[in-house]
Image (spheres, rainbow, N blue to C red):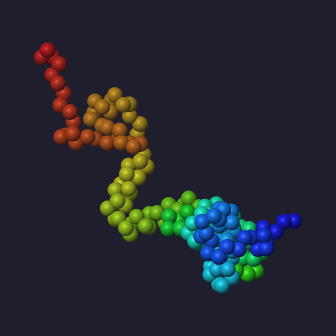
């Protein structure tokens, strides 16, 4: 079985910024630097690893941490959600240990409840407008034939019919005069 992070196969190259250094050697040097930073006690997620290198990609950073984790050199300390509330990403620390349990996914009901609470706190006007639109969509009004509804001055609004205000109604042209 091949060991992924056998440091004897890495090329030692100081700061990793020499002109003639290939990309692979630079990435290997970056892996060594990341490993040393984690050994000194720093906790890292894949974004921290990605930001610490000039040549590595996000996938490279994720793979680097995955390889270290597979080798049982690091463990998951906690899971962090981004500001947008997406799926959580692991935060790693050096050493063997038990991985923190991955949090359960939010159900749709929970997501909606959190959105409404945030909307109430941040923008009460938008919340009130959203609540009124939802009430119009959810109301149970009897089915009307569109032609009869138009003759009576009703307009379709969501799932229901609303009576147009007098100033909104278009004046009827007198067809008999022509």
Residue 161 spot, x, y in % from top left: 35, 40
Residue 16 relative to residue 82: left or right = right
Q: Residue furthest top?
A: 178
Question: Looking at the rendering, which quadrant does residue 37 occupy?
Answer: bottom right
Viewer can see residue 40: yes
Q: How many marks?
A: 0
Q: Is residue 146 above or below residue 43?
A: above
Question: Considering depth in this image, is 173 or 33 the residue closer to the camera?
Answer: 33
- Looking at the rendered image, the quarter that the N terminus falls into is bottom right
Q: Position of residue 129 (x, y in %)?
A: 34, 56
Place residue 51 in its image quadrant.
bottom right
Q: Residue at x 76, y 80 (%)?
A: 96
In front: 17, or 58? Answer: 17
Note whether 175 is above or below 48 in the view shown.
above
Residue depicted at 67% across the width and 73% down the height: 13
- Along the viewing direction, whichever of 127 and 79 lies nearer the viewer: 79
Q: Residue furthest bottom?
A: 40
Give the quadrant of the C terminus: top left
Where residue 19 sits in the image (x, y, percent)? 60, 65
Q: Position of residue 109 (x, y in %)?
A: 54, 60
For residue 47, say whether it is visible.
no
């Amino acid at each position: 079985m091949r060991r992924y992070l056998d440091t004897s196969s890495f090329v030692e190259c100081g700061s990793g910024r020499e002109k003639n250094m290939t990309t692979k050697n630079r990435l290997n040097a970056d892996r060594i630097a990341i490993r040393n930073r984690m050994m000194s006690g720093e906790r890292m997620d894949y974004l921290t690893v990605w930001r610490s290198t000039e040549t590595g990609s996000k996938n490279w950073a994720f793979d680097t941490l995955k390889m270290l984790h597979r080798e049982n050199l690091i463990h998951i300390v906690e899971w962090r959600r981004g500001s947008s509330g997406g799926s959580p990403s692991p935060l790693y620390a050096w050493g063997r240990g038990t991985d923190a349990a991955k949090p359960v996914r939010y159900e749709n009901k929970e997501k909606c409840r959190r959105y409404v609470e945030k909307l109430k706190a941040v923008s009460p006007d938008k919340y009130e407008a959203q609540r009124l639109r939802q009430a119009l969509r959810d109301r149970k009004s009897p089915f009307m034939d569109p032609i009869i509804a138009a003759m009576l001055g009703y307009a379709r609004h969501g799932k229901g019919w609303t009576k147009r205000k007098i100033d909104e109604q278009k004046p009827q042209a007198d067809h008999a005069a022509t």
